[in-house]
Image (cartoon, rainbow, N blue to C red):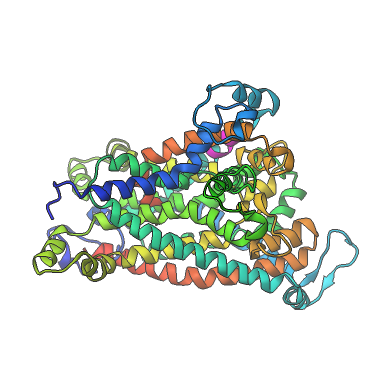
Amino acid sequence: MSSTQSPHPSTMRSQSSSLSPAAQGTATPRQRFPLIRLLQAPSVLILLAWMIVPLAMTIYFSVNRYNLLSPDQTGFVGLENYQFLIEDPAFWPSIGNTALLIGSVLAISVIGGTLLAVLFDQPFRGRTIARLLVIGPFFVMPTVAALIWKNMIMHPVYGMLAFVMRHLGLEPIDWLADYPMLSVIIIVAWQWIPFAFLILLTALQSLDTDQKEAAQLDGAGPVRIFFYIVLPHLKRAITVVIMIETIFLLSVFAEIFTTTAGGPGTATTNLTYLVYALGLQQFDIGLASAGGIVAVVLANVVSFFLVRMLARNLKGVNEK
Amino acid sequence: MNDNKKSAWWVAVLGWACAILLFFPIFWVAITAFKTEQQAYTPTLFFMPTLETFSEVFQRSHYLGYVQNSIIVSVGSTLVCLLLAVPAAYSMAFFPTRRTQKVLLWMLSTKMMPAVGVLIPIYLLAKNSGMLDTVTGLTLIYTLINLPIAVWMAFTYFNDVPREILEAARIDGANAWQEMIYLLLPTSLPGLASTALLLIILSWNEAFWSLNLSSVNAAPLTVFIASYSNPEGLFWAKLSAASLLAIAPIMALGWLAQKQLVRGLTFGAVK
């Protein structure tokens, strides 16, 4: 962050500010406005409380026996809840389902989003309108998305898919009964393809056309251009999409709640739904809290990488 | 390839085919909303459009109550968020310390905590404090989950304010308040507006906390629509009419703000 790289070398820069180019016009911000930093205090304190208090409570509950149905039996039990959780017949399926859901939706939305972004990077008639249609599903609330698909698209008798299949002379499929996890994946992916598309298209539009033209002059075909120019350019945006989607997909709930309620059996129970079922349906606060902690640990692994990348990013912005 | 040249015809066909395919479920809801319940089960595009279903939805299900909850919760939490975030972002962007970057990243990291990790304590706290199924409780939760995004987004917009303008103002002897009111507010207002828009969209569509913390009194549209998941909810025309009204306004806002959304959703990593 040396000031020699600044496009405005004549400006006085305060050494302490490594972050904000806007602030560097202020000669001595500290002496002029010492109290102005207190403006951060409410946000910081509120978020600190929001982060620490509930999390501490979850940890506390997770090492205690606490069931709302038998409130007299309480007390410290160590890691017993975690042991029960791991032995719970729904636990490993829920981890598997969480991984399957996240992995499939990521693959579908990143690959689909990239292809769509490349397609919509070409000029064609009505592109602006078509783009609005593509990003539309992202703004549909999860419960509406789930019910549209469950009732009107995937319904084995009256659903649109059944209608199409009958016309093709095929036997209609009872999607949510026969392929429950696939159905949930389709519904969630439908909501997240537009997200990946929107981000990747934005990133793609910042690609220098000169580079592509130079490659074309050198005789590179569209496939080679895609793999050697477009894809490397999108690398960072794809990483951002993957990480942000992972965080949200870990908490998929409404789509499962309104379509399959985690079933049949445990076929569509993910970690989030399992914690909900243990805590708010079976009222086993201790066991559910242990599940919550497992989810927190999983999310932390992901966010560690995301925050590190964003930190690099902040520095990158400053060095320009 | 020249950018001004139109692409091959198949690009347009493929692009439109993808768009229509992805949009079809929404289109189908919009069509079905104007059918009667009997027509709703037949996949036809040719029918007499009727507003009958809409009036039924309004009459039967206290629909406007849910709409009201959705509006109060999303607008309310957005306002509180901005009230907290704008001063914080202002001080971070213009009066940073060595710690500012760490504070920002830490704020963001609170967003990465999965909701389910704190579901149990929040549910119990809400229950014991009488906040369960109240609009206040939901507004509070939405404020907390959106605050990091609000601070982060406002910060990136403040950071984009060209500092030459600020310097010029200082040379002309403007004080901090004048600077804020005459320079910062007008230059960053579009950014703050899109921050508000993103927050409204996120809280309008939020469906984890609303499903878990509200049932009757405070239920927003997300929860109301979920009530159609029981067998009785096989009234497609009503489901469609209610859904269309719930998603149309927010989709319009989203379409208007699509460019700014990218920045907010990626925390400024992709602009």
Rendered position, B180 above or below B149: above
* Along the viewing direction, whichever of B228 and A159 lies nearer the viewer: A159
With B70 as the anchor, is A87 left or right in this view?
right
Query: Count the marks: how many?
Result: 0
The N terminus of chain A lies in quadrant: bottom left
Where residue B71 appears, as percent x and y from the top left, is 56, 34
With A173 as the anchor, is A73 left or right in this view?
right
Rendered position, A237 above or below A198: below
Where residue A15 appears, as percent x and y from the top left, is 26, 66
Give the quadrant of residue A148. Answer: top right
Q: Which residues are magenta?
A: B69-74
* Along the viewing direction, whichever of B269 and B63 lies nearer the viewer: B63
Where residue A199 appears, as percent x and y from the top left, is 36, 55
Give the quadrant of residue A92. Answer: bottom right
* Along the viewing direction, whichever of B43 and A309 lies nearer the viewer: B43
| Magenta-span inclusion, residue B219 | no
Rendered position, A47 above or below A214: above
Q: Is residue A24 visible?
A: yes
Residue depicted at x 77% and y 67%: A286
* Residue at the outermost front position: A169
With A123 as the anchor, is B146 left or right in this view?
right
Rendered position, B231 above or below B101: above
* Along the viewing direction, whichever of A5 and A168 lies nearer the viewer: A168
Residue depicted at x 59% and y 72%: A297
Residue depicted at x 69% and y 59%: A262
With A230 as the anchor, is B59 left or right in this view?
right
Give the quadrant of residue A98. Answer: bottom right
Q: Is residue B160 visible?
A: no
Where residue A107 appears, as percent x and y from the top left, is 45, 65
The C terminus of chain A lies in quadrant: bottom left
Type of secondary structure dominating the magenta stretch:
helix
